[in-house]
Image (cartoon, coloured by chain):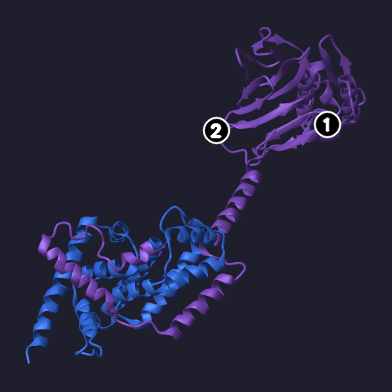
């Protein structure tokens, strides 16, 4: 996670409004990994993640004159990614319904990738992937986005209280799984 | 600076407020444990990221970009320009000005004729649509209005003449700075209206609006002087003699009697005659008689047209 303060983001916002592509490049450097991670949280497709990322930055560039420097540029980027991901999801679902309704199941089902089952990181990755979508989204955003609690709530269009509930539920789930995992490891 | 990045390593403040004390510690531990692990589903691919970055750089450095907003703005601007241009062309009135020395005849879109005296201007809308046929006059003009359902309005600087189908003369002038509109009616009926008062004119009557009011009641008038300016332009195109004499009577406000002519066939003869400039009634009658092979006699009120002695 690149370090970047509010001050810096506000400066970039002003510069990008004035079509400064240097500032735009800096913004990209500072934010792309969190955004890519978020895109992957929303759509379970590695290739599509890069496409969403690129589309999001282009979208921001296209609307640069309407950027409000007093508001969080980061939150705006997350919102753009979210909108693009949802648009893709709807379009894809529509195509699938038209073409092969049966394939939908296969696409929506969690992708089981090669996981190093003996490694805790791999397990946690699996557990997070298997969470209900909203819970997973809140957890990932809290952990990696750099957005404030309030900003996450706004992004998802829910109250901060709901965000809390999802986060607590995610942590409880992980705790239970960790306990079970540890017990499993302890027994011969 | 560090506040935000550290925040990701700490559980969001207040997130566990509603959780029981002992569980709170437990969950915070889970958080710290999990946060340290990279649990992203995929690891970013450096090559792919490089491509995205290169593409973004290529597309944002383009000096000029037709983004959607710009296209719409331009389109709206062009459309607005077209609309206002055509509106300008359609809505701006046509203005006709007669040249310094002469008069000008104008045919309006509804078929009515207007004869403009020298140094006068007439304006009207190109399409002549709406509830009324409306023209604006500055100076002097003689109107021959085609009878139509819609009223015909002549607006001047201080009055409006409302007519249906008629022939009349309108003069606008300034008398010691006060706008004056003077109307002389030849045929039909018109209403002349100032801001405060108005009046109705019958044939061969004239009245003036001075400022905002009618100056006096309509007065009978031969119109000879009023209409003198028109006389040079008098013309008859393939008209019967009977019509021509009636026309002269009307134009000059004189009596032209044709009772002395026994043979109706003579009066039914057709003639084309274009007067030279500034003809008096006498000269015109004399000219017509000479061409038609007739003679005339001057009377108290006008002229008696007679058959030639030789015929």
**Which chain is tinted purple?**
B
Q: Which residue is mark 1?
A: B103
Q: Which residue is mark 2?
A: B131
Image coordinates for residue A128, horizontal then vertical, percent: 22, 76
Hey, which residue is sitting farthest bottom in the picture? A188
Chain letter behind tag 1: B
> Which residue is pictured at 44% across the width and 72% down the height?
A55
Image coordinates for residue B202, horizontal then vertical, percent: 65, 15
> Which residue is pictured at 38% across the width and 71% down the height?
A35
Q: Does residue A83 appear to the left or right of B238 in the view shown?
A: left
Hey, which residue is sitting farthest top in the picture? B216
Hey, which residue is sitting farthest left in the picture? A187
Q: CA distance from mark 2 to mark 1?
A: 29 Å
Counting residues from the start of the chain, the first of labels 2 and 1 encountered is 1
Q: Does residue B15 appear to the left or right of B110 in the view shown?
A: left
Residue A110 visible in the snapshot: no
**Which chain is tinted blue?**
A
Image coordinates for residue B228, horizontal then vertical, percent: 83, 21
Q: Secondary structure at mark 2?
A: loop
Q: Quadrant of the C terminus of chain B?
A: top right
> Which residue is pictured at 75% across the width and 20% down the height?
B171
Tell me the number on the disc at residue A135.
Answer: none
């Amino acid at each position: 996670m690149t370090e970047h303060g509010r001050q810096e983001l506000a400066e970039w916002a002003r510069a990008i409004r004035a079509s400064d592509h240097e500032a735009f490049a800096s913004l990209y450097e500072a934010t792309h990994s969190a955004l890519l991670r978020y895109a992957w949280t929303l759509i379970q497709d590695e290739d599509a993640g890069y496409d969403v990322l690129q589309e999001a930055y282009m979208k921001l560039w296209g609307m640069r004159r309407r950027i409000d420097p007093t508001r969080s540029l980061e939150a705006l980027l997350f919102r753009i990614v979210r909108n693009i991901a949802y648009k893709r999801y709807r379009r894809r679902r529509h195509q699938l319904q038209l073409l092969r309704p049966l394939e939908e199941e296969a696409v929506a089902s969690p992708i089981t990738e090669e996981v190093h089952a003996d490694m805790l990181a791999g397990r946690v990755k699996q557990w997070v992937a298997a969470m209900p979508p909203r819970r997973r989204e809140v957890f990932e955003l809290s952990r990696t986005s750099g957005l404030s609690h309030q900003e996450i709530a706004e992004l998802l269009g829910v109250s901060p209280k709901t965000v809390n509930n999802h986060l607590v539920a995610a942590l409880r789930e992980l705790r239970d799984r960790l306990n079970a995992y540890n017990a499993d490891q302890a027994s011969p | 600076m560090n506040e935000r990045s550290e925040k990701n390593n700490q559980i969001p403040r207040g997130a566990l407020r509603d959780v029981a004390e002992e569980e709170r510690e437990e969950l915070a531990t889970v958080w710290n444990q999990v946060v340290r692990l990279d649990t992203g589903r995929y690891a970013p691919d450096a090559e792919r990221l490089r491509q995205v970055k290169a593409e973004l750089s290529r597309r944002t450095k383009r000096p000029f970009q037709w983004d959607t907003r710009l296209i719409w703005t331009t389109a709206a601007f062009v459309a607005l320009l077209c609309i206002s241009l055509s509106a300008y062309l359609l809505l701006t009135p046509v203005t006709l000005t007669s040249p310094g020395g002469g008069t000008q005849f104008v045919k309006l879109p509804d078929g009515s004729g207007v004869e403009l005296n020298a140094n006068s201007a007439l304006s009207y809308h190109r399409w002549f649509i709406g509830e009324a046929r409306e023209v604006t006059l500055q100076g002097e003009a003689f109107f021959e209005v085609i009878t139509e359902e819609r009223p015909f309005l002549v607006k001047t600087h201080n009055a409006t003449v409302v007519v249906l189908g008629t022939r009349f003369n309108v003069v606008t002038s300034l008398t010691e700075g006060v706008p004056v509109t003077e109307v002389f009616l030849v045929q039909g009926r018109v209403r002349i209206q100032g801001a405060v008062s108005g009046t109705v004119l019958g044939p061969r009557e004239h009245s003036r609006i001075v400022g905002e009011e009618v100056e006096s009641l309509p007065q009978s008038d031969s119109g000879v002087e009023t209409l003198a300016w028109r006389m040079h332009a008098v013309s008859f195109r393939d008209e019967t003699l009977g019509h021509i004499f009636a026309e002269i009577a009307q134009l000059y406000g004189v009596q032209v009697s044709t009772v002395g002519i026994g043979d109706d066939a003579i009066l039914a003869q057709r003639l084309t005659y274009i007067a030279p400039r500034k003809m008096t009634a006498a000269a015109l009658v004399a000219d017509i008689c000479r061409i038609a092979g007739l003679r005339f006699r001057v009377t108290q009120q006008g002229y008696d047209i007679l058959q030639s002695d030789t015929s």
